Amino acid sequence: MNSGCYFRVDPRLVHATTMSSWVPELGAQALLLVDSDLVEDQRRRTICELSAMGQLEVLFSSEERAKHAVAACRTSNVLVLFSSLASVERAMKAGLVVARLNIGHLPAGPGRRELHPAVHLGPEDAAAVARIEALGAEVFVQPLPRDAATAIEPDGLAIVSSVHREPVRARTRSAMFAAAKFCVVNERGLHLRAAQTLAQLAGTLSAEVKVGHGTECVNAKSLLGLTTLAAGLGTWLEVSVEGNDAQKGLEAIRNLFATGFGEGVAMEPTEGNS
């Protein structure tokens, strides 16, 4: 086992929090993404590599080969990322040794209970955590380095000690939330480079940033998510910012859209465009 590996579950894989918080916190020199579907998807692999912005090496492995991929790493500081608890379980059953596992993000959904604003577990997740612990891993919740690492109760529906959260009543809703519709005005639309520029800006904000188009809504800090919107020239996107300095963050995003993500303006936005 590579003793310098740090194991984390986050379905977003490489995104702003990974690069701006965890990589410097750990002094990581390589990312190892364990996901069989990702290994087979050249487009998604390219997006993950671009999201790392050349800061460190990005490696890919299937769950079945994860043990060997870790052993083959040329550096001692490796951040190993899994997209799901199921991936962790498969990798461990195939021989990967995981001493400690950080659950950094699991999205909300039907039947899932919030353990932290970024981590939601349902009965199936709780069962997976129990199986992973039975395989020898200590499982804990820690979305950000500044958060306290908290263990999960055996039922998987509570944490041993609460992560500190500022009471919502101490801040007004108006100060915490802002939303608007912005038009994509650059000729190439929200292509990879433009999406990367938007994701980087969103990553500098402490607030949560969402971008929606039709029935789709994605995390603006996720390059992969932004590219799935397929937003071309003239597309109107709904942007919401929730958290500290929400209005200030929204204005920064408004300005980025207005400049065509730094690529120039190919059209003047009108509400008639869709």
Image (cartoon, rainbow, N blue to C red):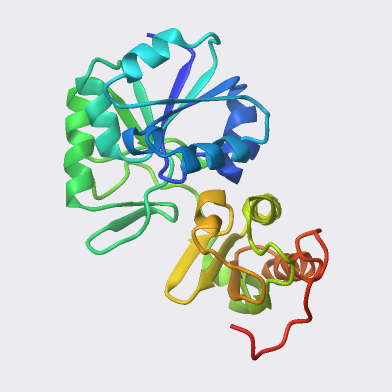
Can you give x and y, in whole percent of width and height, for residue 105 in the image? 42, 46
Query: Is residue 149 left or right of 166 when viewed as pictured?
Result: left
Question: In the rendered image, which quarter contains the C terminus?
Answer: bottom right
Residue 59 or residue 4, whichever sits in front: 59
In this orientation, does residue 2 appear? Answer: no
Q: Is residue 249 above or below residue 22?
A: below
Can you give x and y, in whole percent of width and height, for residue 201 in the image? 71, 54
Question: In the rendered image, which quarter contains the N terminus?
Answer: top left
Residue at 53% from the left image edge and 10% from the top image edge: 76
Residue at 61% from the left image edge and 75% from the top image edge: 235
Query: Is residue 25 left or right of 255 when viewed as pictured?
Result: left
Q: Quadrant of residue 240?
A: bottom right
Query: Is residue 67 left or right of 58 when viewed as pictured?
Result: left
Residue at 79% from the left image edge and 68% from the top image edge: 255
Q: Is residue 162 above or below residue 87?
A: below
In this orientation, does residue 199 appear? Answer: yes
Can you give x and y, in whole percent of width and height, for residue 68 in the image? 35, 12
Residue 161 or residue 133, whichever sits in front: 133
Residue 198 or residue 174, whichever sits in front: 198
Query: Is residue 262 left or right of 13 when viewed as pictured?
Result: right
> How many marks can you see?
0
Can you give x and y, in whole percent of width and height, for residue 59 in the image? 49, 24
